[in-house]
Amino acid sequence: MKILVTGGCGFIGSHTVVELLNQNFEVVIVDNFYNSQKDVVDKIKEITKKDFKFYEDDCCDEAAMRKIFSENKIDAVIHFAGYKAVGESVAKPLMYYQNNLDSTLILAKVMKEFGCHKIVFSSSATVYGDPASLPIKEDFPLSTTNPYGTTKLFIERILKDLAYADKDLGVVLLRYFNPIGAHESGLIGENPNDIPNNLMPYIMKVAIKELPQVNVFGNDYDTKDGTGVRDYIHVVDLALGHIKAIEKIKDETGVLVYNLGTGKGTSVLELIETFAEVNHVDVPYQITERRPGDIAACYADATKAKEELGWEATKNLEDMCKDAYHFVKRVKNL
Ligand code: WQD
C-alpha cells in the first residue's frame, strides 16, 4: 500500500513514517515545515535505510495536492498536518480555523477526485473537554474549550458527514492523549524551537539547563497530589497505533473511533520526579498559578483499540523519559 502522510516531518508524523517504512509500506510525505525541521527527512532515511517521496508543500494548496495525487497512486492518507498549539489558537482563532479546516477540505476533495477512499485522522483527547468521569470512553460527550480543539471536533464531524454521503469512504479517528518520548535512535523527537507550551519538552529544556525551572501550573486540583493528571503515551506506541488503523480500514468503510492512550494517569510531579530519577538529572520546579483552560485529570479507557485494532501501548513512563532525554542530548550535542 502507498500511504500519503501529511505533516510527515512533525513529531508524531515522523515517528509514524518510520514505522510505516519498517513494515514495508510505500510512503509519500507532504510537509511545509511550519512546525517541523527539514533535516527530519534525512533522519527518517538514516533510521530506516528506506527511501520515500517527499513534497515540500502546504495542504491548503489545492494545485500542489492535486499534483501529488496525479503523480502517486495513493491508497490511504494519514492526516497529521495542522496547527496544534492550544494557547496560540485562543489568540489566533482565524488562522487555526482557516488552516486546519481548509487543509482537510482540500485534502478530502482531491482524495475523492483521485479515487482515494481511506483516511486516518489525527484527532485528540481534547475533544472530550472536561470529562464527567474517568477513564474516558469513545462514546463520552464531546465538547471543546479552545479553537484548536474545536478544529479537531469540526474535522471529525466533517469526515463523519463525508462517510455518510460516500459509502466507499473509510475513516479512522484516532484520539491521542499526551504523546511524549522519542525514537530509540535519538535522531527524531519533539524539539520545539521556542518556549515549550507542553510539559515534557519544558522538562527537557530544564534538564539541559536551557530553562531554570519547571513552573507547575497549580497543585490544588482534586488529584493524587494536587497537580494535573494526564495519560502520557510513548510516541512510538502512538505511531504503531496508526499502522493498526491503516490495516483495519483498508478493507472496511464507515467511521471508526479509537482512544490511543495507556489508560494510566500520571501527575505533573510524578512525571518530573520520574524524569529526574531515570536520567539522573536535576529538574528544579516551583508551584505557580493554574493555567487557564486546564482540566484536573484526563486519561483513556483504551480497551476498544485493544479489542478492535489489536493495539495497546507497551512502553512505560521510564521508557518515555529515557528516550526523551536521549533525544534532547543528541540534538544539543551534550
Ligand atoms: C500537561 C500537564 C499542565 C506545562 C495539550 C493539548 C492536547 C495535546 C497535548 C495536541 C497539565 C501541566 C504543562 C508546564 C505544567 N496536544 N503543565 N507546566 O494541556 O494536557 O494537552 O497537549 O493534540 O490537545 O491540549 O498538555 O503538556 O500542556 O500539560 O504544569 O510548563 O502539565 O497544567 O496538567 P495538555 P501539557
Image (tube, grey):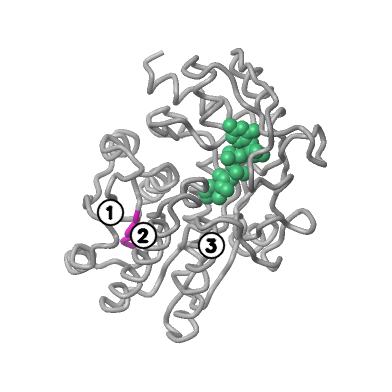
Identity, as a three-letter code, of the amino acid under mark 2 = Asn
Q: Report the side of 319 relative to 82 (left or right).
A: right
Q: Secondary structure at mark 2?
A: helix
Q: Quadrant of the C terminus?
A: top left
Classify mark 2: residues with Cα within 10 Å, few (<14), some (14-19) or many (20+). Answer: some
> Does the residue at mark 1 contact the one at mark 2 (Cβ under 8 Å)?
no
Alpha carbons under labels 2 and 3: distance apart: 13 Å
Q: Is residue 78 above or below residue 256?
A: above
| Residue 268 locus on image (x, y percent) | 68, 32
Residue at (46, 46) in percent of width and height: 88
Classify mark 3: residues with Cα within 10 Å, few (<14), some (14-19) or many (20+). Answer: many
> Does the residue at mark 2 contact the one at mark 3 (Cβ under 8 Å)?
no
Q: Earlier in the sequence, mark 2 or mark 3?
A: 2
Alpha carbons under labels 3 and 1: distance apart: 24 Å
One can see residue 315 in this view? no
Q: Report the side of 279 relative to 108 (left or right).
A: right
Residue 187 sits in quarter: top left
State yes or no: residue 136 in magenta: no
| Residue 151 locus on image (x, y percent) | 48, 62
User: 319 or 176, which lies in front?
Assistant: 176
Identity, as a three-letter code, of the amino acid under mark 1 = Val
* Disc sitting over residue 150 in the figure: 3
Q: In the image, which residues are magenta?
A: 1-6
Residue at (57, 57) in percent of width and height: 175
Residue at (71, 38) in percent of width and height: 228
Q: Which residue is mark 1?
A: 30
Q: Quadrant of the N terminus?
A: bottom left
Q: Nearer the viewer, mark 1 or mark 2?
A: 2
Q: Which residue is mark 2?
A: 99
State yes or no: residue 4 in magenta: yes
Q: Secondary structure at mark 1?
A: strand
